[in-house]
Image (tube, coloured by chain):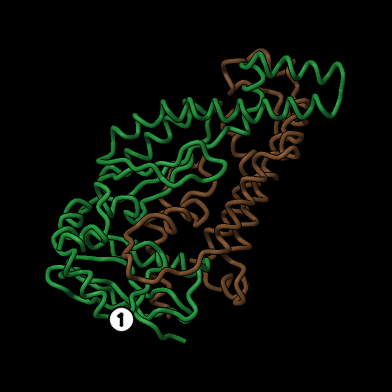
């Protein structure tokens, strides 16, 4: 079932506790181990063969990182990182030692909260009421029902929904950023007008959620907000555009 | 095995279930964080990365659903069915909407379109040979998935309640 080099979940401080019952990717789920290098440790397990982005493995990766994060900061790896062998992991941790320590320090006591803004597809009545152009097109369709006119109306609705959501998201963003230590724009997700992650102190999670609630209620006719978290700090593991490659070149 | 499950449940609870954000239908599910797990986090160049071919296909499918003529027609229909007489009194106070029947009808159509994206995602991510049956038995892992489907159908009702 398992071969190839270790699957790497993330990097923790060398004194980070490892819950014995913690399991990782693979079927059956693999046991996690620590691979200490200097003041840091890599969290690894055997890598399943073949390794694919299956739902249960993605969840196992995330759950392991979340559980670890309860006991201290974790630099989460992207899903699916498999090292050639344990020595390669040691080399990486040695060359990135100082940088990793700084990153761990920065993430201590903090979590990632992700907020996505989507068009408020459930608020069509508000859209029709507030958008004269949509009302015109709607009247056209009602006077002369036709395929073309319907497509025009529908397209205008989709565009107006997107515009209203984008406008509202711009208002929401600074309100949430005020409660965060850092912000990071997430990858584009189809159907969303904004995908943003916030680095938030654990003690501020409740306040952050309350702020999302307030903004959601305030702009409910224009945007649908979806919050997820606390999450592993995926978006804040590598600050200032520093990459592992750059660290290797420097060290 | 039992202790492991307890542990996972605990982590899940700490993470998601305590959320008060009721308007978020799928908070904390894989669906909402997939792109972060796959596109963010530390990368080490010399390490091998799992193939994500199926996931890329998903993204393209989603785009087609969002901006197709079919979607336009569904929105147009939902829009045409709105009872503006009933709603015109409250152009700035959405809580007072009384045309909920017409509104939720349109909403359901739209939700269906959106749901089809979610179905596709589950197919791609969950559609491995181990199948879903095995996952259904595992409790904590399946919970977000169930919630996904349920939350979608529940949402219009929930919203109406809050609008009363």
Direction from residue A134 to residue A205 in the image, left or right: left
State which quarter of the image contains the N terminus of chain B: bottom left
Q: Position of residue A196 (x, y in %)?
A: 40, 41
Q: Position of residue B46 (x, y in %)?
A: 32, 70
The chain coloured green in the image: A
Mark 1 crowd level (few <14, some 14–19, many ≥20, 10 Å Cα) = few
Residue at (28% x, 72% y) in the render: A43
Label 1's element? loop
Direction from residue A103 to residue A85 in the image, left or right: right
Residue at (47% x, 41% y) in the render: A116
- Residue that numbered label 1 is attached to: A85
Direction from residue A226 to residue A69 in the image, left or right: left
* Front residue of this view, candidates A25 and B23: A25
Direction from residue B81 to residue A120 in the image, left or right: left
The chain coloured brown in the image: B
Chain letter belonging to callout 1: A
Q: Position of residue B23 (x, y in %)?
A: 52, 39
């Amino acid at each position: 079932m398992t071969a190839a080099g270790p699957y790497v979940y993330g990097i923790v401080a060398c004194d980070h506790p490892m819950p014995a019952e913690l399991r990782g990717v693979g079927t059956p789920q693999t046991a996690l181990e620590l691979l200490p290098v200097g003041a840091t440790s890599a969290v690894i397990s055997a890598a399943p063969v073949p390794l694919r982005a299956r739902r249960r493995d993605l969840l196992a990766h995330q759950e392991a990182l979340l559980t670890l994060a309860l006991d201290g900061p974790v630099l989460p790896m992207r899903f699916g990182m498999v090292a050639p062998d344990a020595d390669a992991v040691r080399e990486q941790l040695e060359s990135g030692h100082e940088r990793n320590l700084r990153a761990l320090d920065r993430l201590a006591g903090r979590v990632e909260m992700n907020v996505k803004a989507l068009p408020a597809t459930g608020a069509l009545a508000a859209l029709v009421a507030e958008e004269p152009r949509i009302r015109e097109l709607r009247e056209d369709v009602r006077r002369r029902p036709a395929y073309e006119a319907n497509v025009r109306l529908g397209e205008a609705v989709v565009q107006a929904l997107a515009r209203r959501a984008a406008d509202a998201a711009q208002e929401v963003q600074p309100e949430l950023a005020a409660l965060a230590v850092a912000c990071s724009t997430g990858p584009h997700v189809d159907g969303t007008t904004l995908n943003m992650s916030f680095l938030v102190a654990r003690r501020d999670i409740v306040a952050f959620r309350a702020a999302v609630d307030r903004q959601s209620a305030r702009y409910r006719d224009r945007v649908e907000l979806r919050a997820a978290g606390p999450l592993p700090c995926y978006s804040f593991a590598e600050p200032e555009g520093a990459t592992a490659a750059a660290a290797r070149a420097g060290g | 095995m039992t202790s492991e499950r307890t542990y996972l449940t605990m982590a899940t609870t700490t993470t998601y279930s305590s959320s008060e954000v009721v308007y978020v239908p799928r908070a904390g599910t894989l669906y909402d964080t997939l792109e972060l797990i796959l596109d963010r986090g530390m990368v080490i160049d010399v390490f091998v990365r799992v193939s994500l071919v199926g996931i890329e296909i998903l993204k393209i499918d989603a785009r087609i659903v969002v901006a197709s003529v079919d979607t336009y027609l569904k929105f147009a229909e939902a829009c045409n069915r709105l009872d503006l007489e009933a709603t015109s009194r409250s152009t700035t106070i959405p809580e007072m909407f009384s045309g909920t029947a017409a509104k939720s009808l349109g909403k359901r159509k739209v939700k269906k379109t959106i749901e089809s994206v979610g179905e596709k995602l589950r197919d791609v991510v969950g559609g491995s040979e181990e199948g879903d049956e095995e996952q259904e038995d595992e409790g904590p892992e399946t919970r977000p998935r169930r919630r996904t489907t349920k939350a979608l159908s529940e949402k219009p009702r929930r919203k109406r309640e809050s609008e009363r």
